[in-house]
Amino acid sequence: MIMMKLFALALVLLGTVNAGMYVDFNSRESIRSAAALKAEDVMSFYHGQEPGHTPGVLSGPGPEHNDYVWWEAGALWGTIIDYWRYTGEATYNDVVQSSLLFQAGPNRNYMEPNVSAFIGNDDQGFWGLSAMLAAETNFQNPPPSEPQWLALAQAIFNTQTSPDRRDGSCGGGLRWQVFALNNGYNYKNAISNGIYFNLAARLARYTGDESYAQHATATFDWMESVGLIDDGFNVFDGAHVEHDCRDINRAQFSYNVAVLLQGAAFMYDFTDREAVWVHRVDGLLDSLLRTFSVTPAWDDETNTDARIAFEPACEGGAFNVPASGCTGDMLAYKGFGARWMAATMQLCPWTRGRILPALRASAEAAVRQCRGGENGRMCGMRWSSGRYGGTLGVGQEMNVLSALMVLLIEDPADSYDQGEDLGAVTYGIQQPAYVPLTHDTGGTSEGDPDAGRSSKNSGKGLAPITDTDTNLAAALTSTIVVSKFGVFLFMCTEAFEWRRIGKSQSRGVIARRPRVEDNSVKAPLKWTDLEARKPSSRENQIRSRSLNGRLPVRPDKIHVAHHRYKRATVYREDDDSVFGDDEASVVDGRLTG
């Protein structure tokens, strides 16, 4: 009995213990083993290899019971590439390779037809970042008949550099959305431009082509000129073109800063340590650690200076935002921050003294609250609380996996045997195995400078309008007006409710449900399609291209949960579902955002 108590005490002193995980943060092997468990938990959310599922993407239900969005799968594969990179564990490499290739689409530029109509520049860009990482790490190359990692990254860069994606509004910059009919097309945001900057900087370093660096520099300069980056290196979310980008949305998210930080580190290395990039790396790192970390809730005398990764926009405490919960997007931001800070440390060694302690403190806090799920080790979002928050999702698991694996940055996986007792960790000697490769330092991925330039659905402009077009449009408009008036009269004659319209790569139908006189007894769901699309297989969920119009219900009788495409999930007032987060609102029956 005494020995058991002493053993338990030793566990507490050596590391972090909870119902499902134990990590000794003084042992690289313990960290590596914990990362393996988290990788397993991350991949438990992926079913793309199973019958009836689409390879490469995450299928629902995701955060708040909606489907995961397409871009998050692209981010997932980058996370698993980094997992292989830091641990040497190749269990999931074949799945990663097949997923990245399948979703590249017929034009090999990540404008996959199933999602291209609703795609944002940032969505496409996340897949590009993963392809670029595959090139920089010599991740297993595709067969010769398939597009290569570098060429895929170049294809995305080329499509986003094309005049089809550019205009004179606001003096430059990428719009959020690719196509003019999408909500958000009039918005130029930090993440779309930040990813483009990041990708350009990394292409410059990998290929040695100065033209990529020129695009990267111009993008960063533009973001500063319009105020998306201020003098204190705070990074704000975006602005609207109809206001010449002067109406800055001052919301701040950690991934906006982190993606710029990593890109600035690559520019520092590519430009042979230019002072301007030293200044920008320092400023962005200051901003990231200042704005997106907090002191933990518990009293730990051994780590009194520790600050824990924190997302104030959804965890509360900043920007006048209450702690009302995170959107599906926000649930993955902490992992991006950990991975991109680690990459910064690789290229800018003077930052290690600040980054590495922050990474370790956050990892310890993250593991402390991983007590959920059937296996007792699933993780939540609120690391600084020390308590599991009760939500499950791939974003939460990617965050903790990232926090753990980046601690291995100074220990190549092949430098020790599995069973070797490594003793206490001594941080300080960076191993070159983790420094991103270039074509001149051993990178084997082949590129194509013209990749993506002839893509059929890259966001091209419209052809000139002819008289025939005008006549056809007039006839079609008349038909639509008559049809919509008929639908309106129909709506007025029957009570019906709108059900969930979730975020999905294949949004399909708008539907109605028959009247339910007694809300305590819900009638069987018999959906009537208002569009010629197949309903979702999930009985209570339907998918819609947009709610960009008047809602046929009273605004005080619905709840709207917003997601990144400014489409919405609408719930009955008496629905007991957990609502999502909302940046949109309902005013006089109209959805705005």
Image (cartoon, grey):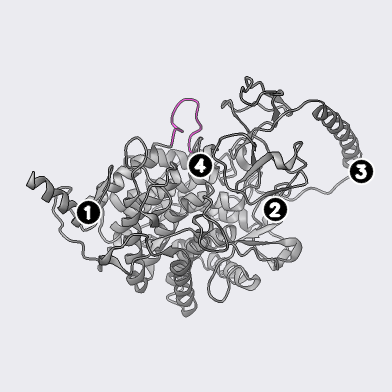
Front residue of this view, candidates 213 and 57: 57
What segment carries the magenta color?
A: 46-56
The mark found on residue 63 in the picture is 4
Tags 3 and 2 in contact by the CB under 8 Å rule?
Answer: no
Q: Position of residue 7 (x, y in %)?
A: 13, 49
Residue where numbered disc 3 is placed: 467
Callout 3, which amino acid?
Asp
Front residue of this view, candidates 558 and 402: 558
Rendered residue at 57%/42% (across/down)? 579
Q: Position of residue 564 (x, y in %)?
A: 60, 49
Rendered residue at 47%/77% (across/down)? 279
Residue where numbered disc 2 is placed: 185
Of discs 4 and 2, which sits in the foreground?
A: 4
507 falls in the magenta region? no
Looking at the rendering, which quadrant does residue 559 occupy?
A: top right
Q: Quadrant of the N terminus?
A: top left
